[in-house]
Amino acid sequence: MKMNWCYIAILIVILLLGTLIEGKKNRLRGTKWWTLANTAPQENTLLNPNTVLYINPSLQPLTRKQRRLVTRNAGTILAIAKGARMAIQECKYQFNSRRWNCPTSDDSHGTSVFGKILQKGCRETAFIYSITSAAVSHAVARACAEGIIYTCTCDLKRHFPSGRDWEWGGCSDNAQFGHKFSRDFVDVVEKGRDLRYMMNRHNNEAGRMHVSTEMTRECKCHGMSGSCTVKTCWMRLPTFRKVGNYLKDRFDGSTRIYQGNSGRGRTRGKKFNILPVNPNHKSPEIKDLVYFEDSPSFCNPEPAIGFHGTMGRECNATSIGVDGCDLMCCGRGHTSKSYMAKERCSCTFHWCCKVHCEICTRTKMRHTCL
Ligand SMILES: *[C@@H]1O[C@H](CO)[C@@H](O)[C@H](O)[C@H]1NC(C)=O
């Protein structure tokens, strides 16, 4: 009888461990859709009906729930692949002159395009989650308006009354559909009660909010010979560069958080709350990025997160900012090499409308960290 209880206890422990490990695996499995960025862009094939041969992005890197969602909303896979590309490109642009420069791997067999930094809870992790979920929102909302997705169209709702000299018309980007789809698709794996789950969910939503609340009105005049007697307007998404800029600002001002007891602080839909570690800071707002772990210095190679360090990185010898050689090379010093660069110069404008330039060769310096 005693033995039996022992066996049962061991069995329960094994089962618990199993679900824990499974949960961790699933979470990263849920970010495998980022590898869709490696599939060929589809725009050209869609615009050019003569192209018969094209490779449809595979559903293979998706979880079962994600597959179901994508299958139910035919066409979304193209938008998701485009979103993955946009997110990676924007992340690299925004972090171009930082020590951590958003390194990615093309290895589509690996669990994650952005590497093991996802297993951390630092500010960079927060940015990756926010920019990728924002990108899905953005790409899907746009694709709705472009007629690529079967289950959505332009947003035809009038958001507020027409003005005195214009009326609603045209095709608005479907931010609402994009937001909801991204939430269902991206957040599907973020299940649990731990701080990492709260952090990821919060940052995912922060990313999406920067897309859906920054729409602007665009208008077109339809009157005779361009006169504006008849004007129609529609809502357009912000450019993804703008979204990237906003999120980079949020990254710089991100809030370190810890898991509060329920009942204190602000709850956000679900039954959990996150509180700022610094009691003098206000609770993070919906658009703020949050993290709970310090970032590494990113000076030296960090094998644990697959970061190679700043050795060999180009730096700016005259800047005192993060792109400057002092900070970028972490005091290790740098080498300078001159090289010849070809540039356009002495450009002249010819009426109308041509610009003629000459090609000059100039000596430039390239500085790289030791
Ligand atoms: C280097 O930094 C200086 C000062 O911040 C700036 O004016 C210059 O444009 C930078 N050079 C490059 C190549 O970015």
Image (cartoon, rainbow, N blue to C red):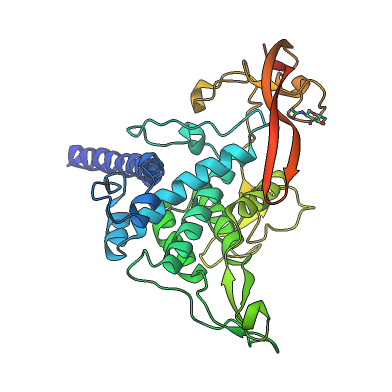
- In percent of width and height, residue 261 lies at 60, 57
Does residue 172 appear left or right of residue 231 in this picture?
left
Q: Where is residue 24 in the image (x, y as percent from the top left)?
A: 39, 41
Look at the image and tell me in which quarter the N terminus lies.
top left
Residue 356 lies in what quarter of the image? top right
Locate ligand 1 by image quadrant. top right
Q: How many labels does the image show?
A: 0
Q: Is residue 188 left or right of residue 257?
A: left
Residue at position x 39%, y 67% from top? 147
Q: Where is residue 40 in the image (x, y as percent from the top left)?
A: 36, 42
93 left or right of 344 in image:
left
Position of residue 164 relative to residue 90, above or below, is below
Question: Splitting the image into 4 quarters, where does residue 234 fall?
Answer: bottom right
Residue name at image x 49 percent, y 50 percent: 197
Q: Which corner quadrant of the image does residue 318 belong to? A: top right
Q: Is residue 12 visible?
A: yes
Q: Which residue is drawn at 60% across and 80% down?
A: 222
Residue, far front? 351
Q: Is residue 119 above or below residue 49?
A: above
Image location (x, y in percent) of residue 241: 62, 50
The residue nearer to you, when weighing 118 against 4, is 118
